[in-house]
Image: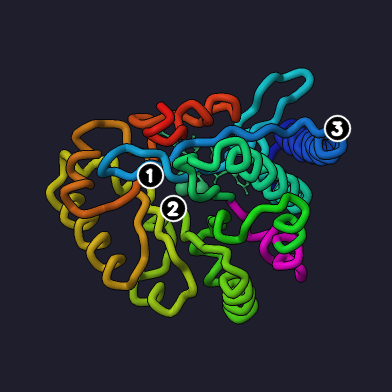
Amino acid sequence: AKGLGKGAWQRYQNDLHTQMVQRLEMRSALHEAIEDEQFVLQFQPIVELGDKRITGVEALVRWQHPARGLLGPFHFVEAAEESGAIVGIGSWVLREALRQFAQWRAENPATTLRYVSVNVSARQFRVPDFTDVVRKALEETGARPEWLLLEITESLVLRDADKVLADLKALRAMGVRIAIDDFGTGYSSLSYLRQMPVDVLKLDKSFIDDILHSRQQHALVDAIVTLAHNLDLAVVAEGIEEAGQHAALDVMGCQYGQGYLFAKPLWPTEIPARTAAPEAM
Ligand code: C2E
Ligand code: CA
Ligand code: CA
Ligand code: CA
């Protein structure tokens, strides 16, 4: 704050103070929210691009705030990561997603649903016993490990590489699958991915946005899909909004997609009708 006049310095101090108070308020509100079970899940369908059949859903957390209404992750996930509250929230999300998924499977054994995808933040993954958290959540809900796809980001893999690798291997040994989320926004390369114990690559929306308008972008996505398949990775294209994007990705051989074109994040009650097997429809 060097060179600031007296008034500016005072404002700067006030701003810092306000920020600190806001942060503390947010922190206690998040802890209260965990205790009061103010978090809810929506589920966004992930479809087979060939026939638009819904084979998976991604669990997306929302905060039913007593005063501010329904809040998306944009409003609180970063703060929750900074304060560490994301560890508790994340454990709840994992258990609730598995509980709900096991219920759908039990209610309709012929459901088209094969797996539920759950986001895991770096902070959450780095707690020493994360694999135990997953094991317990599976046991408590009676969900099968094959039903669970954990979404992690590239940055996580770069930090703490040895511990992360060991944990990923342990999870896969249990039968849980791993996805790299937002692929293309981080730093890792496909050659690096070859050494990682992952099963699925989720291509970030920013890659999909321009495939119809940029030949280069189209070529890039085409190449990534081909390389990923050669590395035995399944590919999910994120943020598909236009029928033309769907068609182009299908031609490239990309097998799975997610986006508003197919469905927005839905409430749990909206899922069964859309995932009843064709025979039952
Ligand atoms: P994400 O993991 O990349 O999830 C996809 C986000 O893109 C979701 O936003 C989804 O609603 C949105 N989306 C899906 N299809 C489209 C589309 O066609 N167009 C557009 N414009 N957007 C689309 P949402 O639910 O607001 O979540 C934002 C982010 O918050 C997620 O990004 C994820 O990073 C984080 N998040 C959500 N739930 C959790 C959670 O349980 N734990 C953690 N750690 N992070 C979470
Ligand atoms: Ca995700
Ligand atoms: Ca994503
Ligand atoms: Ca994203």
Q: Mark 2 or 3 closer to N-term?
A: 3
Residue at 78% across / 36% down in the picture? 26
What crowding class fits label 3: few (fewer than 14 Cα within 10 Å), some (14-19), or many (20 or more)? few
> In this image, 70 relative to 281: left or right?
right
Residue at 19% across / 34% down in the picture? 244
What crowding class fits label 2: few (fewer than 14 Cα within 10 Å), some (14-19), or many (20 or more)? many
For the residues bearing labels 1 and 2, Cβ distance under 8 angstroms: yes
Q: Which residue is mark 3?
A: 36
Q: CA distance from mark 1 to mark 2?
A: 8 Å
Q: Amino acid at mark 3?
A: Asp
Residue at 77% across / 60% down in the picture? 136
The magenta-colored residue range is 119-134
- Asked if the residue at label 1 sits under 8 Å from ligand 3, the reply is yes
Q: Amino acid at mark 1?
A: Glu
- Position of the C terminus, as image quadrant, is top left
Name the image quarter holding residue 208: top left
